Amino acid sequence: MSASYAVELVSVTKRFGEVVAVRDMTLRIPDGEFFSLLGPSGCGKTTTLRMIGGFEMPSRGEIFIGGEPQGYRPPYQRPVNTVFQSYALFPHMTVYENVAFGLEMRGVSREDIRRRVAEALDMVRLAGMERRRPSQLSGGQQQRVALARALINRPKVLLLDEPLGALDLKLRKAMQLELKQLQHRVGITFVYVTHDQEEALTMSDRIAVMNHGLVLQVGTAEEIYEHPNCRFVADFIGETNFLHGTIAGRRQGALEVTLDVGGTVLAQAGQDIGRGQPVTLAVRPERVRLSPGLPGGEVNALSGTVEDVVYTGVATTYWVALGQGERLMVRQQNEQIGAGPVAERGEKVTVSWPVDAASVFAQASEAQAQAAPEAGA
């Protein structure tokens, strides 16, 4: 395997009895990348992280770190360190002692320990707090101690298992930026587990979206948000409208979809879907345009009635009823103070979107994905 990759998983499967937690996973994570495993609880992301760290062993397949096969090596023999959500700090030790612990266990000289602890605490902005104990620190400061303790051993890969989960929302957002900046400074590969889509989009160079033990899509935040490859990814990342229909053919290099609510729209052909096949069309609420009155012949235009209007400061969200129980969410930026909503409740409006704003997924492939065996943590 190539040493240019910090981590490689090749055809890795993990079973717990009858439960398949991770199924035939192949991933390649380059050196210096901030890589996130993203998915709901039970999708297999934590199990994957634990296999990389050596806390669990694959049922099949191999894991390489820096091009070296890990086989059944225990965690302490792997060039990785792990930061857990609980931080796992020693409460009876000072900050200095917590950070120095790993070096002391390895028999590093006192002089080197002092120097490296000072460097590590400076890196995480805790210089001057060496004598404090964990109980005297805030949640964010405790997390920085855990990071310093993990980084001081200079691992090739740092594994992070939802380390921000115990923090309040405001501090969590601040720590997201700090973690990303820290990763840039140290240049170490970070493999990060989270169920928080905004967290993954904010910090990651690339993201693997998982469900039922399967990796469904790997890409940058923009690729996954703008071009999801299946309904689950479109639904899990951000907010999305879904409309059902049937492929009517192709026109102007795009798929022509006859919607169940009536009307025909065009969408980019991301998949090879045949005529007459039932499909789901996905379009983000911020890509939908809303205008008063009935359609005037523009592409991808549908008529509807405004059911609700919600002002949220920077934007206004409209819920538009299209018929047959289908509703469309439309989110428009509030660019002028005091301009008021574009339309009021009960008003007839037109909703439309560009051809490249819609993704189309075959309903048969969605059903197959949902029928996958149950996964683990």
Image: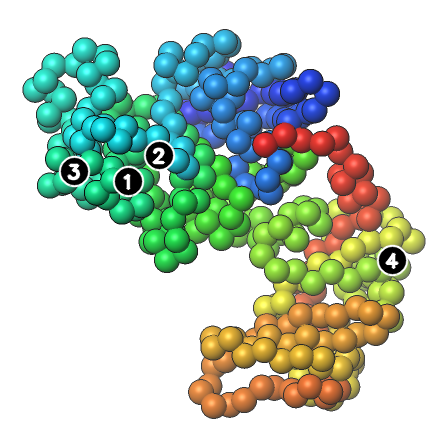
Quarter where residue 242 is shown: bottom right
Q: Residue at x 51, y 90 (%)?
A: 339
In the rendered image, the vertical position of residue 43 relative to residue 287, given as above or below? above
Q: How far apart are marks 4 and 2 (CA)?
A: 51 Å
Badge count: 4
Q: Which of marks 2 and 3 is nearer the N terminus?
A: 2
* Foreground residue among 178 and 103: 103
| Disc 2 residue crowd, few under 14, some 14–19, many 20+, Cα 10 Å | some
* Foreground residue among 196 and 304: 196
Q: Nearer the viewer, mark 2 or mark 3?
A: 3
| Disc 1 residue crowd, few under 14, some 14–19, many 20+, Cα 10 Å | many
Q: Nearer the viewer, mark 4 or mark 2?
A: 2
Q: Nearer the viewer, mark 1 or mark 3?
A: 3
Q: Which of marks 4 and 3 is nearer the N terminus?
A: 3
Residue type at mark 4: give it.
Thr
Q: Can residue 360 be seen in this view?
A: yes
Residue type at mark 1: give it.
Gln
Q: Residue at x 48, y 12 (%)?
A: 69
Q: Is 209 placed left or right of 133 in the picture?
A: right
The disc placed on residue 132 is 3
| Disc 3 residue crowd, few under 14, some 14–19, many 20+, Cα 10 Å | some
| Disc 4 residue crowd, few under 14, some 14–19, many 20+, Cα 10 Å | many
Q: Residue beneath label 2, please?
A: 87
Residue type at mark 2: give it.
Tyr
Q: Residue beneath label 1, please?
A: 142
Q: Residue beneath label 4, please?
A: 246
Q: Looking at the picture, how far across and down is residue 323, in whole percent?
A: 83, 74
Q: Which of marks 4 and 1 is nearer the N terminus?
A: 1
Q: In the picture, which quadrant includes the C terminus?
A: top right
